Amino acid sequence: MEEFLSAVKKLKWGDTVLVQYPSHFLSEYLFLTIYKYAEGAGIPVWVDDVLDSLYSIKKRLELGGIDTSFFERIYVGKIGGRRNVGNVLGQMPFAHEGRILVENYKKILEQSTKKLPKRIDISLGMDELFLLWNNQTEIIGFIKELSTFVGEKNRTAYYLINKDALYHAVVNPLPLMHQMASVVLDLKPMGTKAEVNILKASNLELLGRKFEIKIEDILR
């Protein structure tokens, strides 16, 4: 775990990190890992909450016996959904046009930048957006719009993506997401632990490295 966190510290401001995992992975503990790292480093956390994904994360952590009072310290921008969790700074309806969705969301991000000049950005539920769109032009255009955020020095962004779900989209966006991201992490669950493979990295020192993280270490 310490080796993995040391690697995370070597990520750059402006990095967009794609974290891909299979459907049976306990993604709530991945979220908890990123949050704990940010909290320990004194960096505020902003969550892109698509269709109440943050609410689902919170409920699963509570089922695991985790104290979720820290959610009160998380800043949130919501896309669709109706269950507010954390400090919601902006909210917008779900849009079936990727361009409109991004344009509206940029307004929310402007508010977040005023509040949080530096932040860790965790994006939840992006895979659900891709499943809801039935037009490959919208998907490709949306990823192109996401690429404009790469390199923004006020944040390091983590996109948590269920890669199994994307195989059911009208077009699998994963190859383009790999191209868009500056860092790609692949997670393989192994019981109560997971192997993390760095498939892509802007810091070449990290490229190709592997780590192991255990739930028991996350909960310490």
Image (spheres, rainbow, N blue to C red):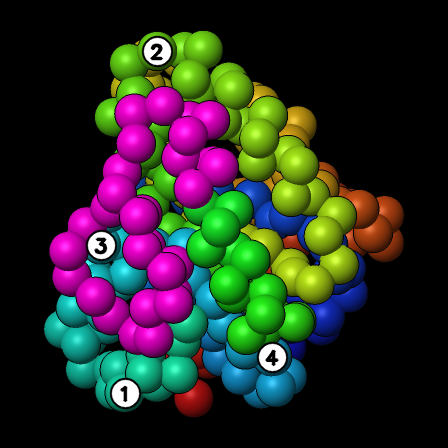
In the image, 116 versus 30, the foreground residue is 116
Question: Residue 175 at what x, y percent from top left?
Answer: 56, 22
Label 2 – label 4 distance at C-alpha: 37 Å
Label 1 – label 4 distance at C-alpha: 17 Å
Q: Which residue is mark 3?
A: 52
Label 3 – label 1 distance at C-alpha: 18 Å
Location of the C terminus (image quadrant) = bottom left
Disc with the residue nearer the chain's start (2 vs 1): 1
Residue 164 appears in the picture as rendered: no
Question: Residue 126 at what x, y percent from top left?
Answer: 38, 40
The crowd level at tag 3 (other Cα within 10 Å; few <14, some 14-19, many 20+) is some
Q: Residue at x 66, y 27 (%)?
A: 179
Disc with the residue nearer the chain's start (4 vs 3): 4
Q: Which residue is mark 2?
A: 135
Disc with the residue nearer the chain's start (2 vs 4): 4
Magenta extent: 76-104
Q: Which residue is mark 1?
A: 69
Question: Mark 3 falls on what kind of element?
Answer: loop
Q: Are marks 1 and 4 in contact (CB under 8 Å)?
A: no
Which residue, as the protein is rendered here, is positioned at the far right? 204
Location of the N terminus (image quadrant) = bottom right
Q: Which residue is mark 4?
A: 43
User: Compared to 82, does 120 lie above or below?
Assistant: below
Question: Residue 103 at what x, y percent from top left?
Answer: 48, 37
Label 3 – label 2 distance at C-alpha: 23 Å
Question: Mark 4 falls on what kind of element?
Answer: loop
Q: Is residue 141 located in the magenta-colored stretch of the structure?
A: no
